[in-house]
Image: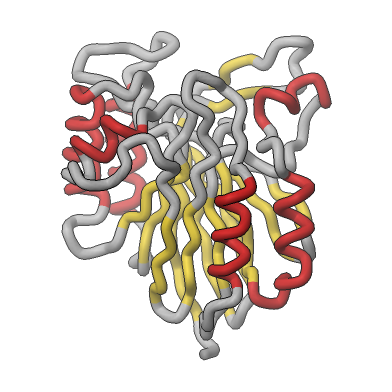
Amino acid sequence: MPGSTTFLHLTDLHLAPPGQLVVGIDPIRQMRGVLARIKQLDVSPTFIVVSGDLTEDGSAESYEVVNAVLSELGGGVTPVLLALGNHDDRATFRRVVLRDERADALAPYCYSWLIDGLRVIVLDSTIPGEAGGALGAAQLAWLEGELQLPAPRGNLIVLHHPCRLAGPVHHYPQFIVREAAALEALVAPHQERVVGVLAGHSHQANSAPFGGTLHATAPAVLVQLDFFAGDEYQPVPGAGFNLCQLDDGELIVSPVLIEG
């Protein structure tokens, strides 16, 4: 199924109740800036993915803000696919955003969705109570099964914690998903059927080869991070997202930055 599909990749919203600042920044203001920039685009995305850290503290009040943002982000028309990050809370997310009281509230939130011939596979790399990320054997086995299913335009994998990172190695344990090597070994045999792996958490735009496909992180909505400023990473004002285009099986990723 040749052709072109445009979609957006947002990450690290860190939304909080009105009036609450996060690292001295109003996350709702940052989100509004991103929403305004999206409305200015001269292309209409087929779908939008948000790769985690929807909220700052995982509270019900914060997820109500997420609900308000989602109604504007997708406009009730464009599918918005959500992943969870280390600042999120699975149980509260399921109750407030999904309105799902039946599911196992603490189980990883992973799923797939076939859109315009492309299977988007959303993984849950969160470890409750920790900043780092992991997938676990069961989720990797589930992913392998998903990659076996028919997908005319291939598969796109989305998770919060990145698998590759441009930055000093002493930052890696907090940012890189623990099973990065296992995930790459799983992707490699299917590289012709995996168009890309998208992640967040790093609060910066990175790209790298991964298992024969493209690995890319997106600029954060809340604030960016400079990993090259010394032993501690430094916040850099500004918001952003990625504009992604799948063109005849090749993924092109373009960061869109908004001055802070």
- Whether 59 is drawn above or below 139: the answer is above
Which residue occupies the foreground of this view, 86 or 204? 86
Q: In this orientation, which residue lies closer to the viewer: 243 or 110?
A: 110
Give whichever of 254, 135 is nearer the camera.
Answer: 135
**Residue that appears at 48% across and 71% down:** 119
The spot of residue 172 in percent (x, y) is 75, 27
Q: Where residue 199 appears, x then y in whole percent? A: 57, 45
Residue drawn at x 59%, y 71% is 147
Task: Tell whether 1 sits left or right of 185.
Answer: left
Residue at 46% across, 74% down:
5
Horizontal placement of 41 versus 16: left or right?
right
Picture residue at 27% right of the left edge, 21% below the top:
59
In this rendering, would 229 be left or right of 1?
right
Image location (x, y in percent) of residue 217: 60, 45
Image quadrant assignment for residue 155 = bottom right
Q: Indicate the position of residue 124 as horizontal and vertical percent values.
A: 49, 44
| Residue 38 position (above or below residue 191) | above
Relative to 184, residue 101 above or below = above
User: In this rendering, would 95 be left or right of 229?
Assistant: left
Q: Residue placed farthest to the right in the image?
A: 169
Disc tally is: 0
Q: Residue furthest toward the bottom?
A: 1
Q: Quadrant of the C terminus?
A: top left
Color scheme of the displayed model? secondary structure
